[in-house]
Image (cartoon, grey):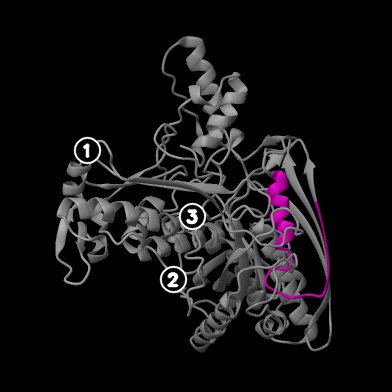
Amino acid sequence: PTQHGYGDRAQLARILGWPEERIRIVSSPIGGSFGGKDELNVQPYLALLALATGKPVKIHQSRAESVRSGLKRHPMRIWMRTGAARDGRILAHDVRIVADTGAYATLGPAVLDFAVEHATGPYIIDHVRVRGYSVHTNCGVAGEFRGFGGNQVTFALEGQMDRLADALGIDPLEVRRRNFRAHSDCGPLGQTIAPTEGADEVLAFVERKRAEVQSRHTVTSASAYHRRGIGIAVTMHGGGLGLRRPDHTGGRVRLTRHGKIELAFGFEECGQGVIAAIPLLAAELLDCAVEDVEVVLGDTSRVPRSGSSTASRATGMVWHTLKRIRPDWESKMLSLAARVAERRESDLRLGPGGVHERNAGRLVASYADLAAAAGDDLPEVEIASHFPVTPDTWAQDGAHYLYSFAGVVAEVDVDLLTAEVRVTGLHQGVWAGGVVNPMGYVGQIEGGGVMGMGFALMEDALMDEGRYVTRNLDTYLIPTALDVPEMELEAIIPKVEDGHGPRGVGEIGTVAVAPAIAAAIHDAIGVWITALPVRQDVLLAEMAKRGETLWRWMPSDASKESTSWGRERIASSSS
């Protein structure tokens, strides 16, 4: 499995000292990559062992080996200093980011660029200084992770907005509103971006949903030792690799001998649902039926170069590619149908199952009829293109042009005895252009939301002197079905099509979840979260400082050997 067959081929060619044409990569779709397969993992060892033995080779890693060798998201330390007027308008924003990239650079520079770009998020701030450092250490190798540095910096930024609101005595949503970007504002780096109402739309969702949640929210719970809280967060997330990045794409459409429309692309299915999206987009943009389409991915001998399945780009690139292919494809197909049916091209149109009469709609020639008539001269169109980038050539490397937006409202229940945090509600409004596959859209956002919960509350690959302490899923905890709360998604459809089609939603559902949960924890117990994942011992200590009523389990006779246990009150509630 891989996110980039042609990328694997290029790197293996360098490792083996071979021309790329000698190497064929055949990948298999995977249920989820989350960035971890955008770089080489076992491929070089497989190739070298296969060459050394002259036999097929399979590598099967234990969980501990997988943990040790697999890529991790970049741990980041982020400092922010923000100045604002009394009315909540932000005047200055100073940010310092230090990212631990481990022993190798891999995608560290690109991840850092993305974090630097998104350090101001969807807010318009006149005076900004952001300094980012990617640092080599003896820790595990860090690389691409779902969100690509946006998760870490958004956690810091949205927490900063909440602290600013608290210091000014202004509602957190209102502080955001007073600094939000408008429809035609520039991007975070001052670059021209596609005009969008996405920011306003997701903020309106957050306002509506928060009010709804608050209307049914109660302070008390089943126990006096529980507190409930509500938190919000918003995000603006760039799609594609950005300016001056190798973000080329392309695709091929051809009629097969058995009368199917074959769509071939060089990116991969890695859990984002592009295999299901391609026929749906083809039906819309090529005026065919879903059943008319065959999809070819994952074999460098059969597909054109289309770049990597990363940066939430694949679905959008299918849309752009098919839009550009349509005129030539239509011309070739109608020309062939006109010969077969002895009709004028102007009287014909593409349609489900074949070519139809333009006015009456009757099927004139099926795709199978056309394939039989074409013989060896089957219609085919292939194009190469590039992901849309800002026209401002002066802009910083990696600057994005297309953005998606999300707003999150999180509900939590905090146990005052154990400091366990349970997410009881997670609601997301997402603006990402049109929806191609409704079920896939929901799956991506809900799955991303659960992954964001793990990022916020559980997942931590601990290291000690350069070695992983966490080696299995008994200590590296991930959310299970029992942890999934009530979830709601509102897909915010643009009022007017902007000419850029759907944005991918593989990442946007994860990015703003952690800061919303952190805000909800603060709402519940008044503790500001400064590090992820949230640790129960830290929460207990902070609650004790605040004078909450807490209990600590200890032996009743104060002896370590005792098996009789009682409770000791360690702090009194001021209320």
Q: Which residue is mark 1?
A: 375
Secondary structure beneath dot 2 equals: strand
**223 sits to left or right of 153:** left
- Gap in angstroms between the C-alphas marked 3 and 1: 31 Å
Q: Which residue is mark 2?
A: 486
- Gap in angstroms between the C-alphas marked 2 and 1: 56 Å
Residue type of the residue flagged with mark 3? Met
Q: Is residue 534 visible?
A: no
Q: Residue at x 57, y 19 (%)?
A: 18
Answer yes or no: do the residues labelled 2 and 3 have beta carbons within 8 Å?
no
The correct choice, above or below, for 172 with respect to 543 in the image is below
- Is 122 inside the magenta-drawn segment? yes
Task: Report the span colored magenta.
Answer: 108-132
Label whose residue precedes the other's in the sequence (2 or 1): 1
Label whose residue precedes the other's in the sequence (2 or 3): 3
Q: Which residue is mark 3?
A: 317
